[in-house]
Image (cartoon, rainbow, N blue to C red):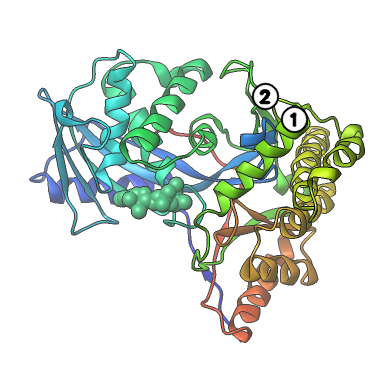
Amino acid sequence: PSTPQWLESWTPAGGARRVRTVFSRAFDGGAPDGVWFAPGRVNLIGEHTDYNAGLCLPTALPHRTYVALRAREDDVVRLVSAQAPDEPWETKLSEVAPGSVGGWGSYVAGVAWALAEAGHTVHGFDAAVDSCVPFGAGLSSSASLECAFAVAIDDVSALGLADDDAGRTELVDACRRAENEIAGAPTGGLDQSASLRCAEGRALLLDFRPGLSAVESGREVPFDPASAGLELLVVDTRAPHALVDGQYGARRAACERAAALLGLANLREIAPDGLDAALAELAPHDGDGVLARRVRHVVTETERTARFVELVSRGLVAEVGPLMTASHASLRDDYEVSCRELDLVVDTAMAAGAVGARMTGGGFGGSAIALVPRDDVERVATTVDQAFADAGLAAPAFLAAPPSAGAGAV
Ligand code: ADP
Ligand code: MG
């Protein structure tokens, strides 16, 4: 019988102990000013909706990046990471600019750079990193790295931004700019919002309609699977991200083309009961039906997200399963961004007793989630693990994911 591999999360005390050890080994036995953390995130529903002015609903993982940091008087930044033991990293903040730095430290230096760009006074620092967020699993290790540094720098620089939601939206923006402009990865801010604005026992409803302020665009929603005897299970498929290049851009372009053909600013302007009319209007321009499928996914996905929020807000967590499974079918059949491994997790988990399951994140690999009755979790994991072995696929990794706190000090 197969033995599923669990990626355990660390307690705050355990994470702090680890990262303090990494710090003291790297910096002559010294102690940091403090330890801060930021979580990875998983999206419960609302996929490929962010660039269509739609809704999505991430929640924070108990898996976090921990940072031990000591402020410096000068503008030197020295970094070490337990996940990159052969790549200690150093720069001067005055030398950080788009295109000037590379490597993992660019995510970190980028946050300090963006805060300085926003007019804050930021000095250099020595810092150590340790993390149990897997890299490249679609769970946003990069955002958790940025956001852990954002709250650390905020604290030692006495900026006070982490003290309220409005300030945190400024930190979100600094982290997004760090990733876009300094690390050179085009991401939209969803991951950083989740890492900085989520709370324990909650999900974060993000609304990407233009015209909303940053604060208005995020709202806490109760999400407590344990209250319904359920657990959120995350499965990192470890699928090689083959053929991804260009697919994201192609989906985005199709959505923009459809909106333009319909004379709309974005696909959110199609009301759920206006979908059939919109598809009929597109038909003459859409020989193979691709645009219709893309639009149908986007419109129904935001509608499913709204219904998910309605259910969990009334405490009906056990009833969201069919929405998750419908979301997966839509991503697989209409948006065509799933893959063999993601489908295998979803089909196997459902057959083994999950109440709902879906791919999460952009697709073509990464992770899937399943909502599973507490007593069935171990069996679902074993069954999925066995299905991967039977199919000749590399073993997936499993994460237990109770909705957890956003970034902060330990
Ligand atoms: P993900 O989906 O996990 O965010 P990305 O490719 O966006 O995947 O980000 C992963 C990158 O972030 C790593 O290759 C590394 O450069 C950086 N990173 C994340 N966490 C750490 C860490 N603990 N130590 C060093 N680098 C990290
Ligand atoms: Mg990332």
Q: Does the image show residue 318?
A: yes
Q: Amino acid at mark 2?
A: Arg
Element class at badge 2? loop
| Image coordinates for residue 403, horizontal then vertical, percent | 61, 43
Which of the numbered marks, if any, corresponds to residue 268? 1
Identity of the residue drawn at 56% across and 66% down = 237
At x 62% / y 40%, what residue is drawn? 58
Contact between labelled residues 2 and 1, with CB atoms less than 8 Å apart = yes
Q: Quadrant of the C terminus?
A: top left
Picture residue at 65% right of the left edge, 71% below the top: 340
Q: Tell me the residue that label 2 is attached to.
A: 209
Q: Taking 370 as reference, is 283 left or right?
A: right
Q: Nearer the viewer, residue 46 or 180?
A: 180
Q: Is residue 67 left or right of residue 44?
A: left
| Disc 1 residue: CB within 8 Å of ligand 2 | no
- Quick one: label 2, few (<14), some, or many (20+) residues within 10 Å? some
